[in-house]
Amino acid sequence: SYLRAVHQIQSEVHFLCSSTFRGALRMSSSLPTSEAVGVAIGLHGQLKEAETISEQILQDKNLILEYQKRMAANRELLSKYRRDEDFRDKLYYLYLGGFFVKLPGAQIQSIVKKDQDRLKEWIELARRQVKNGLRKLEQIRPSERPKGVVDLLLKESKQVQS
């Protein structure tokens, strides 16, 4: 569900980035022009930051999925070797980043177990990064903008849709 929220925030950010300057200037007609430009620049900076963070969250989430797929493949390999009684004595081909190596089963099992441990660490790191990114996004969520900006953007959104 948080991935859906990130996608929603990212689409809001794309829409908001396109209309930030225009909207802030119109919204602040009572403000002097220099203040209105300051508001627009501040909002634009926040929206760019939100978009950058949401893109990083999506990249980290995709990395987690890739690591989990790799872990599943490793688990399948380890369970196959567990069922095969004489795998330690046999030689097998192992694909190592661009080339095949013929190794004994015991050595392959050791390599795969180390890879599993490394993948677990990488998944935990990526999950921490996703959580930190979500915290940052929560601080600058577009829906928590000043009431005038939100009203203006809702009005513009309705105009675009009709």
Image (tube, grey):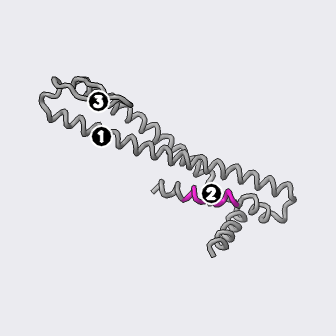
Query: Which residue is the site of mark 1?
Result: 73
Identify which amino acid the numbered label 3 is placed on.
Answer: Leu
Question: Magenta part of the protein: which range?
Answer: 8-18
Which corner quadrant of the image does residue 108 belong to?
Answer: top left
Residue 94's disc is 3
Mark 1, Cα crowd under 10 Å, few <14 / some 14-19 / many 20+, is: few
Compared to residue 161, the image places residue 41 above or below, namely above
* x and y percentages locating residue 10 in the rendered image: 57, 55
Q: Marks 2 and 1, Cα distance to the nearest angstrom?
A: 37 Å
Q: Earlier in the sequence, mark 2 or mark 1?
A: 2
Q: Earlier in the sequence, mark 3 or mark 1?
A: 1
* x and y percentages locating residue 57 in the rendered image: 52, 47
User: Which quadrant of the figure contains the N terminus?
Assistant: bottom left
Compared to residue 161, the image places residue 79 above or below, namely above
Q: Earlier in the sequence, mark 3 or mark 2?
A: 2
Left or right relative to 66: residue 160: right
Query: Which residue is the site of mark 2?
Result: 14
Compared to residue 95, the image places residue 145 above or below, namely below
Identify the residue at the far left of this view.
Answer: 85
> What residue appears at the point 54 percent right and 48 percent down from the top-left corner?
134
Secondary structure mostly seen in the magenta stretch: helix
Q: Marks 3 and 2, Cα distance to the nearest angstrom?
A: 45 Å
> What residue appears at the point 30 percent right and 25 percent down from the top-left corner?
101
* x and y percentages locating residue 74 in the rendered image: 29, 37
Query: Is residue 14 on the magenta stretch?
Result: yes
* x and y percentages locating residue 107 in the rendered image: 25, 23
Q: Marks 3 and 1, Cα distance to the nearest angstrom?
A: 13 Å
Disc 3 to disc 1: CB gap under 8 Å:
no
Nearer to the camera, 48 or 135: 48
Identify which amino acid the numbered label 1 is placed on.
Answer: Ala
Nearer to the camera, 79 or 37: 79
Q: Which of marks 3 and 1 is in front?
A: 3
